[in-house]
Image (cartoon, helix red, strand yellow):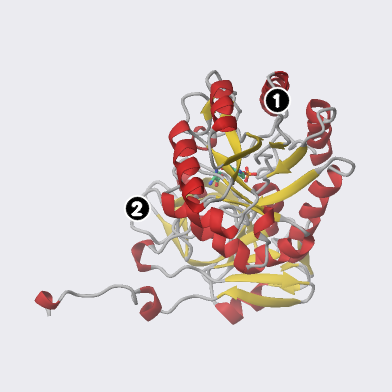
Amino acid sequence: MDHFTYKSGILHAEDVPLPRIAESVGTPFYVYSSATLEHHYRVITEAFTGQDAHVCFATKTNGNKAVLTLLGRLGAGADVVSVGEMRHAIAAGIPAKRVVFSGVGKTRDELTAALSLGIAQINVESEPELRALSEFASAMGTLAPVALRINPDVTADTHDKISTGRKENKFGIDWATAPALFRLANTLPGIDLKGVAVHIGSQILDLAPFRAAFLRLRELVLSLRGEGIALKRVDLGGGLGVPYHRDDPSSPAPSAYAALAKECFGDLGVTLILEPGRLIAGNAGLLVSRVVYVKEGAARKFLILDAGFNDLVRPAMYDAYHEILPVEQPAPDAPYEPLDVVGPICETGDLFARQRPLPPLAPDALVAFATAGAYGAAMSSTYNGRPLVPEVLVKGNRFDVVRRRPTLAEMTALESVPEWLK
Ligand SMILES: Cc1ncc(COP(=O)(O)O)c(C=O)c1O
Ligand SMILES: N[C@@H](CCCC[NH3+])C(=O)O
């Protein structure tokens, strides 16, 4: 369902024309469609109708408080990866009892905060972490609800930097040593062993690696059960991809993913936890930017935008493709020519697209990067003294600024000059 469409020749977010938002908040800015967020949340939850499954939105994808509040109201839990995300999700109204905590490097402070806040589950990723958690929970006189995250050694066909389930990746507990660690977890003080977790990577467009990983989990659950260790929860992680390019293979339907989960776990009597991120937020957001100059280089023609890789790092970091839509709809017979679309940052890698065919775009024209709702604002920085850009949430014909642009004074407020330099 697309809530970003041209109406009377102008790109809209739901019923709001993007130039209206640009006029109000300046450019660049992120804009999210509440209807799309809600739609995707419903699609994934409805796909699991009849299964005991809970959706915990991966808040690293898009941690804006309004987005978390919206999803929390719909019933979502949260998958978090730091104490910051944990407290933020809870502050946005997601109950601690619906929060799961993943990550390979959880510190003592983070683990004890998780225990104090009473979150649903800590996904432990190594033996040292398990032992540390046992010690902290025992000292606090409490029980840590634990799932062990397994590394199933499955290769997902995705970008190398976002594949997490192969044995050379830092994530999860080695498949071969996992049974021994479950036995240990079952006896350690302070540990309440709830289940098993997996997350094999992100932007996965094929169900086969999920099937391979799920079957390994199934085998593990059954063999542990044979030893008297009954796991009640299976956390499937996230990873379902979304289309960025019209030639991308179609992403697996959530219904097919749910059917796979049922096939692998339906007879085990376990509760499933899902951690989708991109699937919910990816195409719920655009990054809108303004053309600053069109520059004729010796070898290339450049479209220079006011957004840089500090605002959307995915193309620079993963060679990711984002569709670039002119906000003013091009005429059907507009001539397209290949342009290098770049930002103002002083790095050659500040390149959004190489030789992208685009219609004529003059300075001040607005363009929108599609599918920027996931890992967009969340991964942005202030490199080159650039303020984080505003985020705007649209509902029907209204829009609200859900994070404003900071002033320079706010950006530098935490810095200080030592006495000896004054
Ligand atoms: C543990 C964990 N769960 C869930 C996700 C969300 O992944 P995705 O956005 O691909 O659904 C991630 C990120 O890859 C993750 O590391
Ligand atoms: N940041 C990545 C996804 C990584 C997921 C985190 N485990 C992206 O933009 O595609």
The residue sitting at 51% across, 47% down in the picture is 137
Q: Nearer the viewer, residue 205 or 42?
A: 42
Residue 51 has which mark?
none
What percent of the width, then of the height, locates residue 13? 72, 67
| Label 2 element class | loop
Would you say residue 355 is visible in this rendering? Answer: yes
Q: Quadrant of residue 207?
A: top right
Of 111 and 36, which appears nearest the observer?
111
Q: Quadrant of ligand 1?
A: top right
Residue located at (50% from left, 34% from top): 171
Picture coordinates of residue 225 (x, y %)? 72, 23
Tell me if residue 167 comes above or below residue 375 in the rendering.
above
Picture quarter with the C terminus: bottom left
SS for dot 1: helix
Residue ID at (42%, 50%)? 108
Amino acid type for the residue under numbered disc 1: Val
Count the numbered circles shown.
Answer: 2
According to the image, label 2 marks what residue? 347
Residue type beneath disc 2? Glu
348 vs 356, left or right, is: left
Mark 1 or 2 closer to N-term? 1
Q: Are marks 1 and 2 in contact (CB under 8 Å)?
A: no
Residue under label 1: 221
Which x, y percent locates residue 153? 56, 22
